[in-house]
Image: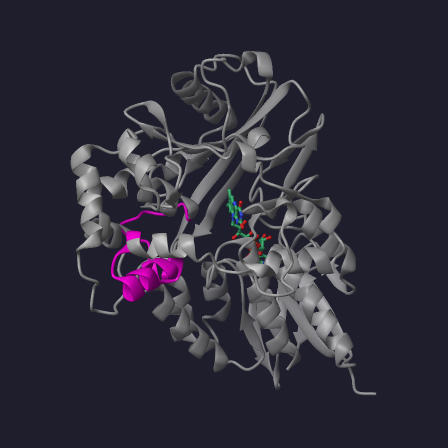
Amino acid sequence: MSSPRKIVIVGAGITGLAAAYYVQKKAREKNLPIHLTLIESENRLGGKVVTHRENEFVIEGGPDSFVTDKPWGLQLTHELGLADQLIPSSEDRKKIYVLRNGKLVEFPGGFRLTIPTQIMPFLKTKMISWPGKIRMGMDFIIPARKEDTDESLADFIRRRLGSEALDRFAAPLMAGIFVADAEKLSMKATFPTFLAMEKNHRSLMLAARYAKKNPPQRKEGAIKPAGNAMFNSFRKGMSVLTDELAKRIEGDIRLGTRIVSIARSGSGYTVEVDGAKPGKIEANSVLLTAQAYTCAELLAPLHGTLADKLREIRYVSTATVSFTYLQTYIPSSRPLDGFGVMIPGSEKRKILASTWSSTKFRHRAPPGTALMRAFVGGHRNEALVELPDDQLVAMVRKEYEELFDITAEPMLHRIFRWPRGNPQYDVGHLNRIAEIEKNVSELPGIFLAGSAFRGIGLPDCIHSAQLAAEKIIA
Ligand SMILES: Cc1cc2nc3c(=O)[nH]c(=O)nc-3n(C[C@H](O)[C@H](O)[C@H](O)COP(=O)(O)OP(=O)(O)OC[C@H]3O[C@@H](n4cnc5c(N)ncnc54)[C@H](O)[C@@H]3O)c2cc1C
């Protein structure tokens, strides 16, 4: 029997854990002996996936759910036997508000992100002025852009729908998903379907109406999400998924261990680690799932151009601040009757958004209580992430008082900081990634995966893990 292939995976977030799981699965299928080492600098597994459970509250520090229109999250959940633990987002309470002149205005129905698909809710909405509506209507006649170069979300929306649509709808909603600056966010990397809509139908509104009449059919045999909802989560929180993955991994899992260097060694590599168990590990293959800037420092001695390209991927810092309340302290004039509120930059508030977690998902808070989560930081107010806990809590309380009339002290609060944790897909991102992929292919046995590259959402991270596992085993 041949000696086992030595595989080192760096980072035990969803990408590293899923990659370890798929590497083992594929090796088993091919009867290939492997020895797996998973290295994680923190003392816990999961990376950005972190669920805190206290007094029946389920508080998420990072992702609270995953989208169900991309298959990889659902597929992995079913494969791990976790389908019975899935819960849908509360489709009966899916209002979204946007702040306008300090007031919460309901996002009109019949919109596909920023594009109206129904005429009446669009005409009635107070979110946008009449001149703004007329400008949006010009989308019907504006010709499609001919050039195929990348452009920013802001340029795209301004060009097709006008500046008001950008400020009122697109920047808070679309750029909000990526915690990014709409002026810098790459259309090609983040909303390619909108580009295809323009290319194929000229007008976004015509394309959206066409899509409404001809909804994409779920592929035969495709897994149905819980409640047929747009978002699914787990009854006990997102870490159910990462905990289950961790249970399935056979190998050497090293927590509190940081990779500090990678050097060539024969046809493979020597990986040096410090922390809990310092030393050197020999590897045939190394998969890096840490932040791009960390990968850059590790790979610089092996491939300078690759390291330079990796350094170009910017990151911003964010924090989530969760509060729990007795329901009686939520003013009846402002019930938490939706998924939450998105806040445009023009409102000059300190928080980016507030998710009303116990409305968005059932099973998040015990009866008679509410759970809310504020997003802080991003490109607008990055320095706020570093405020001491008491000041951060005071700041969010003040925001909640001014926005929602909530004056009560929260029963409990939980803060999670993500310093340099959110990769930014700036204009030109896909070209940059293509170059990174070409450069990394010049280092046999080195692989990259994770949120920095081809999708920040959990399903995309899982997909990138799957693809990396295939390459490693091939
Ligand atoms: C606040 C927030 C909310 C989000 N909400 C959603 C959501 O609702 N739905 C969704 O789909 N996505 C969401 N995302 C995005 C998603 O959570 C992330 O893109 C995804 O979890 C990233 O996973 P990853 O494994 O690629 O990276 P990470 O989770 O960052 O894992 C990388 C790991 O590498 C480790 N590491 C770093 N350096 C080293 C080193 N030198 N040695 C060893 N280990 C190292 C880190 O400690 C970390 O554990 C959210 C993100 C944030 C921050």
Query: Of 346 and 40, which appears nearest the observer?
Result: 346
Total marks placed = 0
Query: Of 75 and 451, which appears nearest the observer?
Result: 75
Q: Position of residue 37 (x, y in %)?
A: 71, 66
Q: Is residue 256 above or below residue 334?
A: below
Q: Position of residue 39 (x, y in %)?
A: 66, 60
| Residue at point 45%, 41% (across, down) | 318
Using the rendered view, name the quadrant where residue 376 is placed. Answer: top left
| Residue at point 45%, 59% (across, down) | 293
Is residue 160 located in the magenta-colored stretch of the structure?
no
What residue range appears in magenta? 178-205
Q: Is residue 245 above or below residue 296?
A: above
**Residue reaching furthest right?**
1
Q: Is residue 330 above or below residue 9?
A: above
Q: Is residue 389 above or below residue 426?
A: above
Q: Is residue 457 visible?
A: yes
Q: Seen in the image, is 144 located left or right of residue 268?
A: left
| Residue at point 16%, 36% (across, down) | 131
Q: Is residue 313 visible?
A: no
Q: Position of residue 47 (x, y in %)?
A: 60, 50
Q: Seen in the image, is 170 located left or right of residue 391?
A: left
Using the rendered view, name the quadrant where residue 296 is placed. Answer: bottom left
Image quadrant containing the N terminus: bottom right
Is residue 181 located in the magenta-colored stretch of the structure?
yes
Q: Seen in the image, is 391 located left or right of residue 271?
A: left
Using the rendered view, name the quadrant where residue 72 is placed. Answer: bottom right
Image quadrant containing the C terminus: bottom right
Q: Seen in the image, is 225 located left or right of residue 291?
A: right
Query: Of 212 and 337, which appears nearest the observer?
Result: 212
| Residue at point 66%, 35% (across, down) | 52
Q: Position of residue 364 (x, y in %)?
A: 64, 31
